[in-house]
Every structure is written in structure tokens, then in C-alpha cells.
Amino acid sequence: MGLREKLEELRQQGIQEINKTEDLNKVNDIRVKMLGKKGPLTAVLRGMKDLSKEERPKVGKFANEIRDELTKAIEDKKAELTAARLNEKLAEETIDVTLPGKPTVQGQPHVIQQIIDQLVDLFVGMGYEVAVGDEVEQEEYNFERLNLPKDHPARDMQDTFYVTPSVLMRTQTSPMQARMMEKHDFSKGPLKMISPGKVYRRDTDDATHSHQFHQVEGLVLGEHITMADLKGTLEVVAKTLFGDQLEVRLRPSYFPFTEPSVEADITCFSCLGKGCAICKHTGWLEVLGAGMVHPNVLKMSGVDPDVYGGFAFGLGPDRFAMIKYGVEDIRDFYQNDVRFLNQFNQKG
Ligand code: FA5
């Protein structure tokens, strides 16, 4: 067989092999096999030295044409198979945009935080500033500065978690009274502040007591502020949160840092005043303590009690939430049961 025929045979064989392969890796093998240094085409070209001078350029030209043709066929095949592979992949990954989406679970503020937010809105609307204190507090601010010297029997009312002998988990938000009044400049007007936050007590947990709960402290100090202002303010709070259905009563009480002192009760939501286990058969639920700020407290924070005075209160948003939503056990707020908490989804 002459070189020409051999070349022609290689061409046909090559084209056939390329055409029938469906595997991208094999296309590369074919290229190496046909056109590589050890391949038949190179071998044929090596044999050209035995050809006559006239034949050599013709066969050489033919051989080059075949190499170009095979190279092109290989490149075309490669492109075809690459495109096919891509299309296959795209088809596999097709997204059905008509499928319903997965709903994103959206959280919401805790129900007690919702009550605090409502209270903050109400008081900010009445011109109060909001001050947030630390949950870890110095004993001095939590007790001494509130007219509760060491060994004062009233300390027993708030059994305390101590961190060090002089640092504790605050038992009330009242330390913020002292912290705010000691830095207030009365020449710029009265002090009106609320301070929401968590407090801690070694209380035995029951339906209305938790060892960790919330308070919102309120303090208004200035000239000519009376108990009537306190009563009016508390009535606005009760009306805003509970509407007109539930009654509020003020009852004389005792706090070392207020004189006179009161506690406010709201009609028990469960028995509507008849008496039940939740209200310990009194018909009322205690929601806050309040009073006119004691002169000693003012003096200790550098405020002249002969010129300035006013009222303070500390209310329990946990109890507010119980009353507003008819929750019979305060501990439910702290168990993180999403089924319970989702009932208070503001978005409905
Ligand atoms: C106080 O803590 C005073 N600091 C309140 C105060 C402030 C009086 C300013 C005068 C002037 P008392 O211990 O009563 O007071 O608590 C206030 C409110 O916190 C209670 O009315 C109640 O709503 C809530 N509370 C008290 N203990 C608990 C508890 N263990 N669990 C849930 N709520 C509680």
C-alpha cells in the first residue's frame, strides 16, 4: 500500500473513531493516539524521506491536510461533548420556580418584652427618658443608697443572690433612682425617667413569683410634685394596658425608700374579684410598689429635699402580662416553650 493510501485509511479511521465517541476523555485519547509523536501519522511522515523529490511535497501536503482535518474534527467533537455535558447539568439543576417556597420562621419579642415596649412607648410619650442599668449592681446602690442600711430588717423582703460580699444581682430596678438623681441637673428641669430590666431574688418560685423577673422603675423629681401626680400616672398606665374593665386600688404599704408608700393591685383576671387560687383568695393581684421618695434617699444623692421631691414606682411587667393575657402561672414565661410563646405573636 502506498503512503497516500495509508494516509487516506488513517483519515477515514480517525474520522470514524472521532464520530462515534461520546466520551470527552476518549476524544483526548484519540488525539494522542492519532496525532501524537508515537502515532501512525507521525510514522507515515517519517517514511517520507524514502519518497521521490516530486512525490514528497504532494504527500506532505496531503498529510498536513489530514492532520488539520483530524485536529478540527477532534476540536469540534470536544466542543459538542462539552456543550452536551453542560446542558445535561443545567437540566439536572433546573429549579421549578412554581414550587411553593419554604416559609421563613420569624420570631417576635417575648411577651414580657412586648409589655415593656408598650410601657416604654407610653412613658416616652409623656416625656420620660429611658435609662437602662446593670443587672449586676453594687450593694451600696441596691440597698444603702435606698435608705436600707446593713442589717435593716427590710432587706429580708428581698432575699439576695450575692456575687461578692459587696456586689449582687440587683433585687430591684430602684438602684437606678440613685444613679439617675445623683447626676441630674435640676436647673434644666425635673427628672422624669423609667428604667426597665431584669431583677433577681431568692424567692421560692410559685404561680406569681419567679427568682428572675422584670421591673420597670419610674422616678419623677422636681418642685411641687404630689401623690396625686403619682395616682394619675398609675391610672394612665393601668388604662393603657388593661382598658377600663379592671379596677386598680392603692393600698398603704412600706418601702424604706418612699414615705408614704403604697402598693397597687389590679382585679384578679381569673376570678374577677371573687377570690381564687391565683390571687390567693384576695380578688386582687399586686402589680407594683410606689410612693413619695424618702428625704434620706434624696439627701444621699445630693438632692435638697426642701426644694425637690417627687414619686417613684416599681412595677412588675410579668404580672402585667399575666393579667393582660390570662396566664395563670408566671413560670410559663420562662420555659421557652415556643407553642406557648407563639400565642403572643403581635402579627397574629
Ligand atoms: C420593689 O421591688 C420596690 N423596689 C418597688 C418600688 C419602687 C417601691 C419605687 C417604691 C418606689 P416589690 O418587692 O413589691 O417592690 O416588687 C415590685 C413589683 O415587682 C411587685 O408588685 C410585683 O409586680 C413584682 N414582683 C416582686 N417579686 C416578684 C417575683 N418574685 N416574681 C415576679 N414579680 C415580682
Image: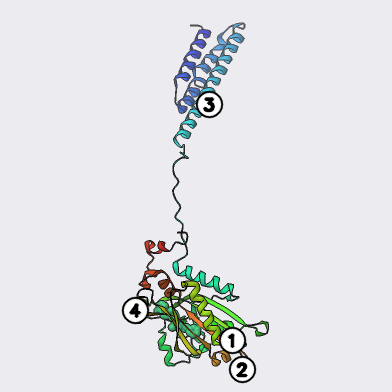
- Report whether the residue tagged 4 is closer than 8 Å to ligand 1: no
Mark 3 residue element: helix
For residue 225, the mark is 1
Taking depth in this image into account, of 142 and 157 the one nearest to the observer is 157
**Percent coordinates x, y for residue 57 in the rendering:** 61, 10
CA distance for labels 2 and 4: 45 Å
Q: CA distance from mark 4 to mark 1?
A: 36 Å
Chain-order first, disc 1 or disc 2: 1
Disc on res. 274 = 4
Q: x%, y% of residue 109?
A: 47, 64
| Residue picked out by circle 3 | 79
- Sequence order check: which comes first, mark 3 or mark 2? 3
Q: Quadrant of the C terminus?
A: bottom left
Give how far across and how far down residue 285 sits, in percent.
Answer: 40, 79
Instruction: Name the residue that disc number 2 marks.
Output: 306
Q: CA distance from mark 3 to mark 4?
A: 87 Å
